[in-house]
Image: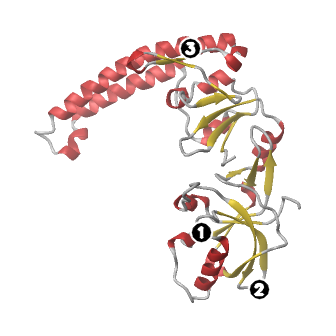
């Protein structure tokens, strides 16, 4: 069956509430026919956690609700429009996964829908847990131009992939932007980073394994990280002074307004300045937005449950 087909999907952020005892966000595609009130119809797939709320039961409840014969359950997720994804694309690296094309997304208000039903002529069954929705241009890059990738393992099971698709940002330069926060759970091209642990919470990156292909860049990374931690010790000391000052004013100032007093604001600004200077000096500024990473030639998406 052609994967480029009409797709119906519930707004995925709502599925985080749809917890299954064995899998918090396991989603699988189910073929659907949707009849609209104007007489037209749409065929596609609904990603759904069948184990938590059986698909057939959900359809029955939705149809009863649409015909005003039933109540609205929280698990039905009718507080957002039904979203239509018209195109699936498949990638095989760094993992096998199905992605939705963002240009093909359409929202359909529930008050335009007359009825839902299963579509036996739509047999595709695919795991789309932690579904990623990406522009077609990004999907083409993932299908053809992967240079390297970092992955972060999450406690909930799935992983997040940071895929470099060009030489616009070298691996060691990209690592600077999230090593501080994710250094204990990162892998490079499928190999866990080797980390040295020291007293007082310090740690350092070892230039071994697959990172040994970048000896000079990795050695500089390690050296800069050590210097960065030295300067961050000053930030830690500044934060302790801030806490002492903050606590000393609790008995004399409204607790909610302590942070607005001149001395406290000045101390907070001093600490923030020290931290920003250290990050900029050594290039360890965190980048959390996918849009900013994309400008650097990096695509971010979640793995799913495989």
The answer to whether residue 37 is visible is yes
Q: Position of residue 140 (x, y in %)?
A: 81, 44
For residue 264, above or below residue 136:
above
The numbered mark at residue 129 is: none
> On the rendered structure, is 24 left or right of 143?
left
Q: Secondary structure at mark 3?
A: helix
What residue is shown with label 3? 222
Q: Position of residue 49 (x, y in %)?
A: 63, 63
| Mark 3 vs 1, N-terminal side | 1
Label 2, label 1: how many angstroms apart (C-alpha)? 29 Å
User: Is 252 in front, or is 218?
Assistant: 218
Q: In the rendered structure, are the residues bearing label 2 and label 1 in contact, judged by CB atoms less than 8 Å apart?
A: no
Q: Position of residue 17 (x, y in %)?
A: 52, 61
| Mark 2 vs 1, N-terminal side | 2
Label 3, label 1: how many angstroms apart (C-alpha)? 49 Å
Residue at the image point whose x is 75% and y is 37% from the top: 94
User: Is 56 in front, or is 42?
Assistant: 56
Mark 2: few, some, or many residues within 10 Å (few <14, many ≥20)? few
Q: Secondary structure at mark 2?
A: loop
What residue is shown with label 2? 39
Label 2, label 3: how many angstroms apart (C-alpha)? 65 Å
Residue at the image point whose x is 70% and y is 30% from the top: 190
Q: Residue furthest front?
A: 22
The numbered mark at residue 53 is: 1
Q: In this rendering, which labeled residue sits more in front, label 2 or label 3?
A: 3
User: Is 34 in front, or is 210?
Assistant: 210
Tell me the quarter of the picture where residue 111 sits.
Answer: bottom right
Q: In this rendering, which labeled residue sits more in front, label 3 or label 1?
A: 1
Q: Secondary structure at mark 1?
A: loop
């Amino acid at each position: 069956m052609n994967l480029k087909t009409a797709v119906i999907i519930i707004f995925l952020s709502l599925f985080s509430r749809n917890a299954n005892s064995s899998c918090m966000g396991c989603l699988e595609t189910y073929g659907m026919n949707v009849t609209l009130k104007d007489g037209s119809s749409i065929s596609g797939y609904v990603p759904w956690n069948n184990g938590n709320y059986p698909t057939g039961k959900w359809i029955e409840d939705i149809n009863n609700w649409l015909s005003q014969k039933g109540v609205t359950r929280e698990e039905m997720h009718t507080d957002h429009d039904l979203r239509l994804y018209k195109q699936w694309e498949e990638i095989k690296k760094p993992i096998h996964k199905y992605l939705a094309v963002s240009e093909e997304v359409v929202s359909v208000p529930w008050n335009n829908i007359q009825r839902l039903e299963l579509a036996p002529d739509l047999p595709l069954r695919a795991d789309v847990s932690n579904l990623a929705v990406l522009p077609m241009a990004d999907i083409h890059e993932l299908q053809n131009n992967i240079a390297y990738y970092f992955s972060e393992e999450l406690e909930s099971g799935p992983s997040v992939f940071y895929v470099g698709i060009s030489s616009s940002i070298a691996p060691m330069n990209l690592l600077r932007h999230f090593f501080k926060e994710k250094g204990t759970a990162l892998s490079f091209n499928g190999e866990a980073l080797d980390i040295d642990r020291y007293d007082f919470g310090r740690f350092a990156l070892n230039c071994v394994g697959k990172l040994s292909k970048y000896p000079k860049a990795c050695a500089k990374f390690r050296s800069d990280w050590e210097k960065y931690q030295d300067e961050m010790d000053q930030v830690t000391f500044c934060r302790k002074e801030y806490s002492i000052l903050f606590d000393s004013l609790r008995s004399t100032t409204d607790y909610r307004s302590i942070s607005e007093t001149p001395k406290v604001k000045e101390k907070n600004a001093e600490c923030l300045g020290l931290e920003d200077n250290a990050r900029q000096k050594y290039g360890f500024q965190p980048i959390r937005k996918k849009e900013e990473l994309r400008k650097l030639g990096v695509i971010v998406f979640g793995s799913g449950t495989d």
